[in-house]
Image (cartoon, grey):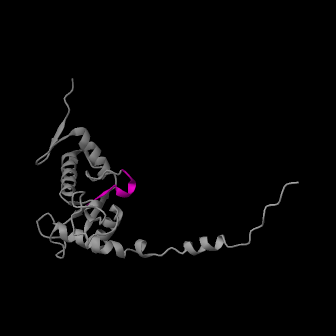
């Protein structure tokens, strides 16, 4: 039997096969730099896992606190999506990325509208804030909930409703009897 090789990073022991997969995702590296590249990949992944999570249920004004809302109902948005939260966080300059296949544990509806989670970086590696205006999780959530109703996709009015009314107004021909 062959023993599998392991790569030892600071706090992680990474199986050789997983290290190769991570290197292929990041890019090709010389064989001698395998350990350093694998450790860098693990550090970047662990840094991303330290980002704060925002689920759409946290900002939804149709949810109760028991169902997962984390901000006051007066400041919450109506049915926000993870994509909208990510757009708002990225627009203000926060490092945010979307995980589409994640779902909030209290959410019972498996529809695509309720799926997704946004990870947002509040602090840099040295512990300083990324943006001074966002010192806490709650400040990011309140900002996102405030800005989501102002999105262009939410404020655009549909012009198609008038056309549907006009289509039925034409003159109708009566059916004649078949002879």
Percent position of residue 93, x then y: 27, 72
Residue 165 placement, left or right of 141: right
Percent position of residue 34, x then y: 22, 46
Percent position of residue 97, x then y: 29, 61
The residue shown at (30%, 61%) is 56
Q: Nearer the viewer, residue 155 or 50?
A: 155
Give the quarter of the image for residue 17. top left
Q: Quadrant of the N terminus?
A: top left
The residue shown at (17%, 41%) is 7
Magenta part of the protein: which range?
A: 110-118
Give the quarter of the image for residue 94. bottom left
Up the image or down, 107 lies above or below 155; here it is above
Q: Nearer the viewer, residue 128 or 101?
A: 101
Specify whether residue 29 is in view: yes
Instruction: Count the numbered circles shown.
Output: 0
Residue with the most extreme right position: 179
Give the quarter of the image for residue 75. bottom left
Residue 168 placement, left or right of 40: right
Q: Which of 135 and 20 is in front in this view?
A: 135
The verdict on residue 65 being magenta is no
Specify whether residue 27 is in view: no
Q: In which quarter of the image is the C terminus?
A: bottom right
Percent position of residue 120, x then y: 23, 63
Residue with the most extreme front position: 177
């Amino acid at each position: 039997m062959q023993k599998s090789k392991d790569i030892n990073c600071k706090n992680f022991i990474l199986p050789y096969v997983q290290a190769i997969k991570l290197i292929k995702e990041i890019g090709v590296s010389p064989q001698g730099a395998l350990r350093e590249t694998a450790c860098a990949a693990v550090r970047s992944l662990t840094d991303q896992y330290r980002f704060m999570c925002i689920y759409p249920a946290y900002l939804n004004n149709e949810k109760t606190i028991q169902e997962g809302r984390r901000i006051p109902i007066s400041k919450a948005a109506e049915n926000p999506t993870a994509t909208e939260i990510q757009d708002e966080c990225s627009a203000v300059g926060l490092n945010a990325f979307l995980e589409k296949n994640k779902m909030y544990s209290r959410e019972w509806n498996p529809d695509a509208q309720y799926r997704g989670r946004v990870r947002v970086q509040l602090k840099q590696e040295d512990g300083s804030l990324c943006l001074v205006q966002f010192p806490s999780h709650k400040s990011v959530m309140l900002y996102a909930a405030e800005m989501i109703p102002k999105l262009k996709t939410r404020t655009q009015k549909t012009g198609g409703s008038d056309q549907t009314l006009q289509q039925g107004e034409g003159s109708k021909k009566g059916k004649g009897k078949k002879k």
